[in-house]
Amino acid sequence: MASYAHPEVLVSTDWVASHAKDASVRVVEIDVDTKAYDEGHVPGAIAWAWNTQLCDTLVRDILPKAQFEKLMTQSGIGDDATLVMYGDNNNWFAAWAFWQAKIYGHKDVRIMDGGRKKWLAEGRDLETERSAATPSATPYRAGEPDYSIRALLPEVQQVQKSRDAILIDVRSPQEFSGEILAPPGLPETCQRGGHIPGAHSVPWGKACNDDGTFKSAAELQSLYGAVGVGESSHVIAYCRIGERSSHTWFVLKYLLGVKNVENYDGSWTEWGNLVGAPVERGAAVAAHKA
Amino acid sequence: MKARNFSERHVEIAGWQVNVSSYQFGDKWRAKADNVSPGANLARSEADSREAAEEQVLTRARELLSRTKRREV
């Protein structure tokens, strides 16, 4: 049976229960719903808010290097710490934080397989008081940003024309087709519905089991192989704002070992608002139609 | 304290698949509703029973989902 390309980036809930308070380990919860942490969290875990601490709050961008260094220092995370991320929605924003940590070169980043949901379902201990991080005495030093794992608009525009990379739209089938502009309950932050012409629809959630864990390597190979993804493929994943696609980016790069995978974090809120950008509407014709 | 009696089920509201999960924490019950496929959180609640907590999130989910505009494709 095939195994994950980089199994070292996943930890189980059992592992976290045993190691969350190790001096070399820092567990961070990152949720879509930023109030979830206060309802109870992995004992010892700190929280990062995706909408204030993991992005530039002035310019639309990821966290600038200096702010990432400040966040890590204040969170008591040293350059050689084992950083374990988890969160709700099967680790959407945990994957987003993982992706940014890799852009800034943190070596040992892991995701708790199954996320918050699995921890709750297993009836594990919850702590309700906020864990206070002791800032590191030595300032964290990030590496030079590795933008090889991030796609920006000009590259996506070029790829859309040349079709020399595989574009994967990881949103829901209804967002892909243009039936809705955003998931129900979220603001409609684009002017046009549909998808980037040539993109394949592989909703992010198809990579997960019901308990929130990732599917097996064989199942993932079958899922993404159906749209032509192999180890040597160049893949660009996108969604609405880049968090669901960071989940798919994680799956492709670390679980399947695809060498050249980028997350287009501008995603549909950029493309779907762009004057003159080509848009395709209609349901997916591939095997992954819902 | 531990989370206890976690359960999860899928219901359909206004044509959308909705995931309703709930668990007991101390003497309270907590529930959450999210939209299954996109995964967007719709509502969360806390009440004295599972039924009451779930009804609160289902009510809110109905409000939000009935307002979601579907477009002709």
Image (spheres, coloured by chain):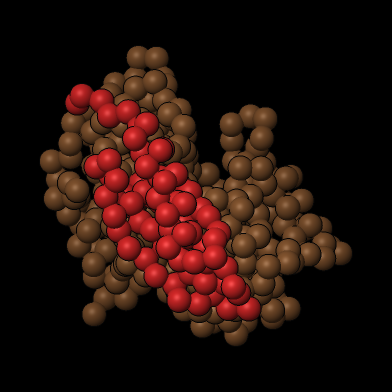
Chain colours: A brown, B red
In this orientation, which residue lies closer to the viewer: A146 or A120? A120
Q: Between B14 and A124, which is closer to the camera in this rendering?
A: B14
In the rendered image, the vertical position of residue A24 relative to residue A262, given as above or below: below
Vertical relation: A136 (above or below) A287 = below
Residue B27: image quadrant is bottom right
Residue at x 24% of width, y 42% of height: B15
Residue B16: in sight, yes or no?
Answer: yes
Q: In the displayed image of the protein, which residue is found farthest to the bottom?
A: A18
Q: Residue at x 46, y 52 (%)?
A: B56
* Depth check, front residue: A209 or A4: A209
- Number of labels in the image equals 0
Compared to residue A17, the image places residue A290 above or below, namely above
In this orientation, which residue lies closer to the viewer: B30 or A113?
A: B30
Q: Residue at left 74%, top 45%?
A: A66
Residue A7 place in picture, x, y as percent: 43, 74
Locate residue A28 relative to residue A179 in the image: left or right. right
View extreme (right): residue: A137
User: Residue A187 at what x, y percent from top left?
Assistant: 46, 32
The residue shown at (63%, 78%) is B1
The percent position of residue A148, horizontal first and vertical second, equals 48, 46
Q: Quadrant of the N terminus of chain A?
A: bottom left
Residue A11 visible to an observer of this rendering = no
Q: Is residue A280 above or below residue A255?
A: above
* Whole-percent x, y for residue A260 in the image: 38, 51
The single residue placed furthest to the top in the displayed view is A276
